[in-house]
Image: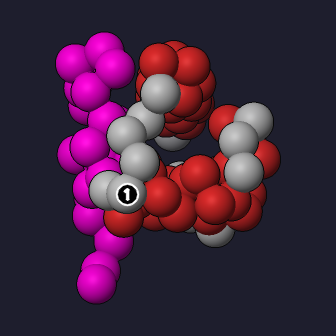
Amino acid sequence: MGLQPAGDMLETPTRSQWPPERVKGLRLALGLTQEDFAHKLGVTFATVSRWERGIKSVSRLGAIRLDQLLDAARATLKKRAATA
């Protein structure tokens, strides 16, 4: 499975709408392992794994943290583009 273009993963999803492929897509676009991604989100590795496999839905708090991480990634990309 190849990486999806970062731009696709960095588009704003509907708040709290984080299906498994979107969670995994964001993680891969950021180049993070499940463990590192979990650490950034303040959840366990097992939680990220369950989200990505669709075993567990993303909680409200998890969605907020994913939204925040997405916003931070988008801001970083904008800064990089402005200095390029």
**Above or below 13: residue 26:** below
The residue that mark 1 highlights is 55
Instruction: Indicate the quadrant containing the N terminus: top left, top right, bottom left or bottom right.
Output: bottom left
Q: Which residues are magenta?
A: 1-25
Q: Residue at x 31, y 15 (%)?
A: 15
Towards the viewer: 40 or 52:
52
Find residue 72 and report its horizontal and vertical position in percent: 58, 25
Viewer-side residue, 79 vs 83: 79
User: Label 1 neighbourhood size at 10 Å, few (<14), some (14-19), many (20+)?
Assistant: few
Q: Is residue 59 visible?
A: yes
| Residue nearest the viewer, comparing 5 with 51 | 51
* Most common SS among magenta residues: loop
Q: Is residue 68 visible?
A: no
From the top left corner, tell me how far across and down residue 29 is, in percent: 44, 56
Residue 81, position as x, y percentages in the image = 46, 33
Which one is in front, 39 or 57?
A: 57
| Circle 1: element type | loop
- Report the colour scheme: secondary structure
Residue 76 falls left or right of residue 81: right
Q: Position of residue 26 (x, y in %)?
A: 42, 49
Q: Say whether residue 3 is magenta.
A: yes
In the image, residue 21 above or below residue 81: below
Residue that appears at 72% across and 51% down: 44
Amino acid carrying label 1: it is Ile
